[in-house]
Structures are given as C-alpha cells and as structure tokens.
Amino acid sequence: MSVRTLQTSSFRRMPESRMAIHSLDPGIRRDNMISLHANRGTKLKLLTLCASLLLLAGCSPHPGSGIWAADSDNAPGFTKIDVQFNGRADIYNASEEKAVRRCFWGGMSSRQITLDCVQAANTDIKEQYRLTVTQDDSAELSSDQQLLGTFAKQPRSE
C-alpha cells in the first residue's frame, strides 16, 4: 500500500469534526482549535448568566401586590384584598371567612393593576376592578371609574 492510499483511507474514516479541523488553514493547529472552542463556551456561559440576571431583575414585586385592609366601610363591603405575587388575588368581606371574589391580576402601569374576578358563590358572574397605589402607599379600589374604597397595605404574616 502506498502512502497516498493510507492517507485517503484514513481521511474517509475521520468523523466530520476532525475533517473540519483538517480542512481549515494548515497554520491553525488542533490545540488552538480547542482553545477557540473553550473561549466560545465561556462567552456562551457569560451571555446566559447576563440574560438570567436581567430576567431576575425584572421579577421584582409590583407595588400593588400584598395584603390591603380597608380604611373604612365601602359600598361592596370588602374588608381585605390579598394580591399575591403569582398573579392571583382574593377579596374578602367581614361576613365570610373565605374569599368572596377570586381574581387574576395584571399590571396596567407601575402603580396600577387590573383585577379580573369571579364571585366565589357564582363563578358565572364576572367583575373587573382596578387597584391604584397612591403616593402615600395606600390604594384605591375602583370599578367602572367609580371609587369603591381605600385600602392600607398590611404586613404579610406567614
């Protein structure tokens, strides 16, 4: 067997990754290629870390999340609003221990959320409320642009 035949037959058996290395500029050695791949991996890890930090920074709680207790009596008789961080909220009144409204909420602005609710007793009845956090960290609950009541933020005890 000639040298040429050995080279040709060994070239055919090489995996594609090795063929790619051999097809590059002959001045680039294999150890340099490994170092190029290592740098690319480091850059990818750094990019992934930066993206993760940006996502976590965007997950700070909305000012409307928390427990809100009524400052005074209001027309619907709501005594407490529990706006949870996971996008759910419960509205309570004085006459029942369980929530009278079950809601999903979403931020409308940096200081306002919309509550899409159903009555606990009859889930076919849907209601929409707006909770606006004021400058003094109290909140106003409204529906159809009418103020229903004001609420003060309470510490969460868990």
Image (tube, helix red, strand yellow):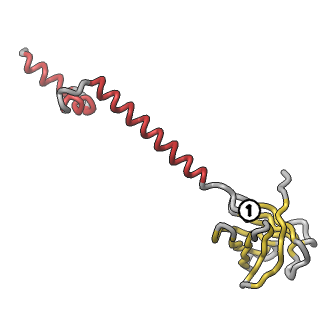
- Towards the viewer: 112 or 125: 112
Secondary element type, mark 1? loop
Observer able to see residue 99 = no
Relative to residue 39, is residue 106 depicted above or below?
A: below
User: Looking at the picture, how far across and down is residue 13, in whole percent?
Assistant: 21, 26
Q: Depth check: 11 or 27 in front?
A: 27
- Which residue occupies the extreme top position in the image? 1
Q: How many marks?
A: 1
Q: Residues within 10 Å of mark 1 (few under 14, many from 20)?
A: many
Instruction: Give me the residue at 86% from left, 74% from top.
Output: 78
- Residue drawn at 73 percent across, 65 percent down: 64
| Residue 9 placement: quadrant | top left
Name the amino acid, label 1.
Answer: Ser
Tell me residue 70's x, y (percent).
Answer: 87, 71
Q: Point out the image quarter for the N terminus.
A: top left
Which percent across, then down, holds residue 142? 76, 79
The image quadrant that residue 20 belongs to is: top left
The answer to whether residue 88 is seen in the rendering is: yes
Residue at mark 1? 65
Residue at 18% x, 31% y is 25
Horizontal side, residue 145 vs residue 17: left or right: right
| Residue in view at x 38 percent, y 33 percent | 39
Q: Quadrant of residue 94?
A: bottom right
Q: Residue furthest right?
A: 95
Measured as percent of width and height from the top left, residue 115 is found at 71, 72
Front-most of 124 and 58?
58
